[in-house]
Every structure is written in C-alpha cells, then in structure tokens.
Image (tube, coloured by chain):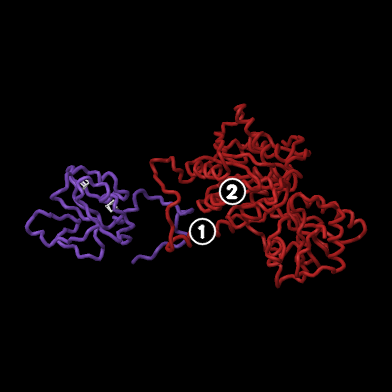
Chain colours: A purple, B red
C-alpha cells in the first residue's frame, strides 16, 4: 500500500478538497446484516433507491438492480421501506445462497430452491 | 495619522470592529461584553458598516454561525465573556481545528459560580488549550490595537488560526480612557483585502469541511495545528512591528518594564500591570531594583523569550487572575516556571489575585515585592493575595 501523506502534505483543517472521493472509502465492512432482493416479487417502485442513505442501490433502466456491497452499511432502511416486502436482511456470515454478487435472487425460479431461508 | 479620542474599552473594541468592517458578525449579549456589541449593532443599523449581523439564541449558536460564515468565505468577528465563552466551548475548539481565522474579543469576566459579573481570567484561561491565539490587552488602547492586529495574524497564510484578543471586564471595558486611533483608510490598508481560502461558496471547487477524521489522519491534523501555532510567533512579531511603524505603538510578546537590571520581577497579564508599573516606579525611587513583565501573548506561549527577558532575576512572582484548582495555584505559573526550569536560578512563586473582580491594590503589590525581597514565601504553594482568613 502507498505511504499515507505526512502532516505537511495534507490540506489544513482536515478539509477534503476533492469532490466525491468518499467512494474510495469502503464502508461495507461495517455491515452485520446484508440486504438481498427477490427480483421475482420486486415491483420496481425504486423506493429503496430513493431512501438508501448511502446510494448503494443500483438502478438501471428504471429497474432495481441489486446492491453496491462495497458501501452498503446494512442499515435495513431499504428492507423496512420496501412495499413488496421483497428485501430481506441476512447475517453477513450466512452463505450467499443463490443470490448473485449484487444480492439478487429469484424465489420463483426452480433453480433457486436452495435460497437461504433466514428470517430478518 | 493618529486621532486622540476618549473611549471605554468596549467602545474602543467596537470602533476597531467598525474600521475592520467584517462581512459577518454573529453574537449574543453577555455582561460585560454587551456594550461592545450594542455599540457595533448601532454601526450596523446606521449602515456605516456592511456587516451582516446575525443575532442568535445563544453563544453556542454564535460561534457555530461564525464557523459556518467563515467556512463559506466571509471575514468574521464576534465577542463574548465568561459563561458565554464556556457555553460555546465545543465549537471554540472546532473553529481552531478547521483553521478558520475568526477574531473573537473576550471581555474577561469570572466564570460562575457563585455568579459574578466582574473581572478575572478564568474564562479565557479555561480555553487556553483550545488552539486559539490569545492576546491580553492592558487598557482601551491595547484593546483597540490588538483587535486590528488580530485580523492580520489570524489570516496570515502561515497561521490560519482564530485569535482571541482580551481585556479586563469593567476595569477596562467600562472605563473611559484616552487613546489614539488610526484613520479608517489606514486600518483598511493595514488589514488588507480578505482572501478566503477554500470557501464553501466557491461552487466551482467543492470542498468538505469537518469530515470524520479517525486514527489514520486526526493526529497529522493536530500536528499541523500545533506547528501553525508555533509559526504564529514570528507572525505576531512581524505584524506588531509593522503596526508600530504605522501607529508609533510597536507590539511584541510582552512589555518589559524596568526588568533589565531588576532583581525582583512581577509577571502578570492585563490591567493589573498598570498598577504594578506604578508601584515599581515608587520602589525604583527608593533604589529597589524591581520590574514588571507584562505578558501580552499567552498562546502561543513565548517560553524562550520569557527566559531571556527575566531569567536573570533573583526572584519572580507570577500573578494569576484565575485559580487552576490543581493545588498548585493558577494556570500561568506552571508555564512560566517550566520556561525557566533548569536554565535560571530565579526563585519563582505564585500569587492568585483579583478573583471575581476583587481589587488589586498598590499595597498588595508592595507586599509581593517585600515577600520577594525577603524570601518569605516558599515556591511550593500559591498565595491567595487579599483573601480573608
Ligand atoms: S423498494 Fe422493494 S419493490 Fe421497490 S424497487 Fe426496491 S426492492 Fe423493488
Ligand atoms: S441496507 Fe441500508 S445501506 Fe444497505 S442498501 Fe439498504 S438502505 Fe442502503
């Protein structure tokens, strides 16, 4: 890893002079519970996208396309707000099951029978 | 050109603020500062300054508004006293650590309780570790001069720290004295145009103020702050010299009054030094080699310079107008003694005086010089000068 800057090299007062650099600060490690979304019951209302305090919901072509796990802190606001109740929170230590790397799974698909059944 | 006027300390401070004409002032009234802001509000109401005056609901809000305005890109000033300063505590630290060059006059008053509105230094001594530069003024003249210089010191690129010019409540704030003031043009030219650094309102260059700063960076930011405080010494001297060339009144870290050949020296801050000087004059006539070192700058602490100025004395009394509750006396004492430790043979003793506005009489000062000369007092314990037993 590169050497961190010394005190003379830093902007004074703890200021951050570069806009948008929080993306480089990965907060996903803070998570205890991980959200997962069932894309078979999701109604694409995008309320989760609107309310996630960390902008961790991917929305593409007006569809909810899973999670940015590098930054999602596991606060569960998305799960709480989801009107279709299709977001669940599973312990970070649980296996990922059939969900993909963005946390999407399909409860109605045959192949998804082994999806985790944690209740949270 | 100096103009001779008669003003109280508060009026002199308000006059300095009028001439500085800051962009934003956020303040809340508290005795004995109230009159200062009252006077300045007149200037705002009469539109003789272009200042945006923010009237807030508390001192915590006053300093918070000052921080916001200064970060946004404004030249900012305020003033307070005693419990007002105590109430803004957490944000006083934040102003310094964000490196915002705010100038806040503090009209010294005893902290409650029991509630008291008169002068001592418990308020500003309480925030000696907050990262603000502190300049103590002896009289309305110095109150005026210090405030003008404070702007230059605070905004200097090597410093970028807030400055707290202070003067004694009532004794100075409400006493009419003769002083000389500069013209508005001279003050304007001396302080120069305000140049904001990383202002929030510069939306083409977005910047974040006050982000979370954890184990990996906080220490470096504190080190930077400590170094800026050290650099402030050179800037205070340079600004004091330049101000001297303009006004005829040069300023340094302290005033040396008959100390060069003195065997007994009193070191003190603020209005007390005037009384000590007059006692020294009387003693000199009797051939007693006494002197006074009036400390102007308490933060940063000019330890080396104090050593060279008074290290030759036989005995030194440090007068503290605040009790430190350490069991060892006031806050000024340990710093002076550390400055001399191992490098001077002077015996250094501590007197706590004037708490809650108790007068410091010439007789009391005389008794201190007698103590010093006769070696009556041990250096193990502070004397509470003038307290009833
Ligand atoms: S709130 Fe629920 S239903 Fe709406 S888009 Fe998000 S996951 Fe789908
Ligand atoms: S758990 Fe919280 S942080 Fe993570 S996606 Fe949901 S709302 Fe965002």
Residue where numbered disc 1 is placed: B224
Quadrant of the rendering where the C terminus of chain B is positioned: bottom right
What chain does badge 1 belong to?
A: B
Give how far across and how far down residue B371 sits, in percent. 85, 64
Marked residue chain, label 2:
B
Residue A118 x/y as whole percent: 21, 61
Q: How many other residues sit within 10 Å of disc 2, few (<14), some (14-19) or many (≥20)? A: some
In the rendered view, does B286 fall on the left or right side of B354? right
- Mark 2, ligand 2, within 8 Å: the answer is no
Badge 2 element: helix
For label 1, the SS is helix
Residue at which label 2 appears: B87
**Label 1 – label 2 distance at C-alpha:** 27 Å
> Are the residues tagged 1 and 2 within 8 Å (C-beta)?
no
Residue with the most extreme bottom position: B342
**Vertical order, B32 against A118 (above or below):** above
């Amino acid at each position: 890893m590169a050497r961190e800057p010394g005190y003379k090299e830093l902007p004074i007062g703890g200021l951050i002079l570069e806009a948008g650099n929080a993306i480089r600060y990965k907060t996903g490690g803070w998570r205890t519970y991980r959200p997962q979304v069932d894309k078979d019951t999701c109604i694409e209302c995008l309320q989760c996208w609107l309310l996630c305090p960390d902008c961790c919901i991917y929305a593409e072509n007006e569809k909810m396309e899973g999670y940015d796990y590098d930054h999602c802190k596991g606060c569960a606001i998305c799960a709480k707000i989801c009107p279709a109740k299709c977001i669940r929170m599973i312990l970070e230590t649980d296996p990922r099951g059939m969900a993909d790397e963005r946390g999407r799974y399909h409860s109605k698909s045959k192949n998804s029978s082994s999806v985790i059944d944690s209740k949270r | 050109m100096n103009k001779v006027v008669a003003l109280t300390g508060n009026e002199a401070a308000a006059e300095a603020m009028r001439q500085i004409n800051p962009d934003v002032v956020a303040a809340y009234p508290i005795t004995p500062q109230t009159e200062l802001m009252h006077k300045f509000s007149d200037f705002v109401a009469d539109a003789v300054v272009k200042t945006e005056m923010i009237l807030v609901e508390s001192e915590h809000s006053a300093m918070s508004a000052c921080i916001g305005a200064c970060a946004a890109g404004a030249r900012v000033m305020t003033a307070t006293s005693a419990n007002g300063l105590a109430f803004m505590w957490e944000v006083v630290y934040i102003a310094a650590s964000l490196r915002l060059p705010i100038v806040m006059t503090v009209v010294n008053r005893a902290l409650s309780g029991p509630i008291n509105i008169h002068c001592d230094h418990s308020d500003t001594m309480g925030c000696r570790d907050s990262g603000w530069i502190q300049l103590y003024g002896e009289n309305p003249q110095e109150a005026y001069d210090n405030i003008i210089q404070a702007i230059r010191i605070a905004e200097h690129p090597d410093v970028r720290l807030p400055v707290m010019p202070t003067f004694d409540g009532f004794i100075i704030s409400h006493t009419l004295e003769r002083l000389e003031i500069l013209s508005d043009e001279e003050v304007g030219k001396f302080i120069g145009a305000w140049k904001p650094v990383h202002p929030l309102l510069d939306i083409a260059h977005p910047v974040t103020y006050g982000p979370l700063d954890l184990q990996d960076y906080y220490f470096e930011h504190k080190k930077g702050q400590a170094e800026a405080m050290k650099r402030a010494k050179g800037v205070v001297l340079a600004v004091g010299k330049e101000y001297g060339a303009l006004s005829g009144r040069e300023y340094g870290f302290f005033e040396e009054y008959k100390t060069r050949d003195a065997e007994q020296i009193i070191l003190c801050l603020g209005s007390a030094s005037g009384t000590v000087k007059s006692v020294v004059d009387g003693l000199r006539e009797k051939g007693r080699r006494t002197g006074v070192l009036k400390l102007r700058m308490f933060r940063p602490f000019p330890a080396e310079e104090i050593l060279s100025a008074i290290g030759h004395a036989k005995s030194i009394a440090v007068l503290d107008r605040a009790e430190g509750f350490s069991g060892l006396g006031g806050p000024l004492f340990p710093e002076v003694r550390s400055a001399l430790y191992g490098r001077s043979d002077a015996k250094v003793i501590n007197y706590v005086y004037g708490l809650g506005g108790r007068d410091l009489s010439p007789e009391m000062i005389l008794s201190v010089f007698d103590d010093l000369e006769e070696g009556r007092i041990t250096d193990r314990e502070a004397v509470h000068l003038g307290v009833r037993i």
